[in-house]
Amino acid sequence: MKLGIVGLGKMGSAMAQALASRYEIIGYEKSEAVRKKLRPALAKKIQLAESLENLLELAETVVVATKPQQVKEVVANIRDHRLVISIAAGVSLRVIDSARSAAGPTIRAMPNLPLLIRRGITAYTGNRFCTHEELALAQEIFSYLGGAIYLEQEKMLHAVTALSGSGPAFVFLFLQNLEDAGVLLGLSRAESRRLAIATVLGATELVRQEDCAPQQLIHDVVSPGGTTALGLRALHKNGFPFAVQEAVIAAARRSVELAQEARAQQNSE
């Protein structure tokens, strides 16, 4: 299958790089500055279109990986019923469908940053024109980039944006503070970082393999009156669980606001 990817920034180029071993990839990037930064290895793996029109002539399915404000301009050029997959944050199916020159199947997806190393998780949903085969294609594409979850309701993408979209930054902050704590206790920066990364990797993989609630594994680690029990007490005392939940809720709230702003802009045009 010929898969067109419009926008070869960080996410678009990562998708192109990974999917080139599975599909015939045609890529297009409008920005000359971004084009100059493309890795030579990527340019050898994919076909670079000279223009958006050129890409649309060659590709069967189009992935829109541009900045959100560029999505409408891209899909306005799609004058047939081919499948369009958008990974632009905050741009609703309604906005995309109204910008398309012809009605057709549209899938909106929310991947996250670990997609860069094929360890991402992507949630996606489709409009009323999507067939089972087209949804299955999206599942195949995003599963190849890590994992994929289909959502019946588009509104749940706000929660996804907050949890898995923003979530990596929250994990990075947790990692940074684990590392800093180790340094405060006398470990070298390199030793502390290695221990922190291995701890988070090992803990998350254990949760995945055991397929149980994290709470159960907490009980397995804690000994009465031990170091972990006192550490967990300090986390609760300082509001760690509440802070994590509030971070995700705040991110979800902002996702809703951005969608409302996009709708308001569309209505004013």
Image (cartoon, rainbow, N blue to C red):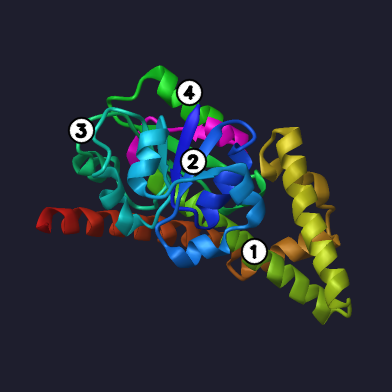
Question: Disc 2 on helix, strand or loop?
Answer: strand
**10 Å neighbourhood of mark 1: few (<14), some, or many (≥20)?**
few
Question: Hey, what amino acid is under mark 3?
Answer: Ala
Please indicate whether residue 41 sits to the left or right of residue 57 in the image: right
Q: Is the C-beta separation of discs 3 and 4 under 8 Å? A: no
Q: Which residue is mark 1?
A: 172
Question: Disc 1 on helix, strand or loop?
Answer: helix
Question: Distance of mark 2 from mark 3, alpha carbons?
Answer: 22 Å
Please indicate whether residue 14 sits to the left or right of residue 207 in the image: left
Question: Quick one: label 2 or label 3, which is nearer the N terminus?
Answer: 2
Q: Residue drawn 49% across and 40% down?
A: 26
Question: Distance of mark 2 from mark 1, alpha carbons?
Answer: 33 Å
Q: Which residue is mark 2?
A: 26
Q: Which residue is mark 3?
A: 102
Quarter location, residue 118: top right
The answer to whether one can see residue 95 in this image is yes
Q: Which residue is mark 4?
A: 136
Q: Nearer the viewer, mark 3 or mark 4?
A: 3
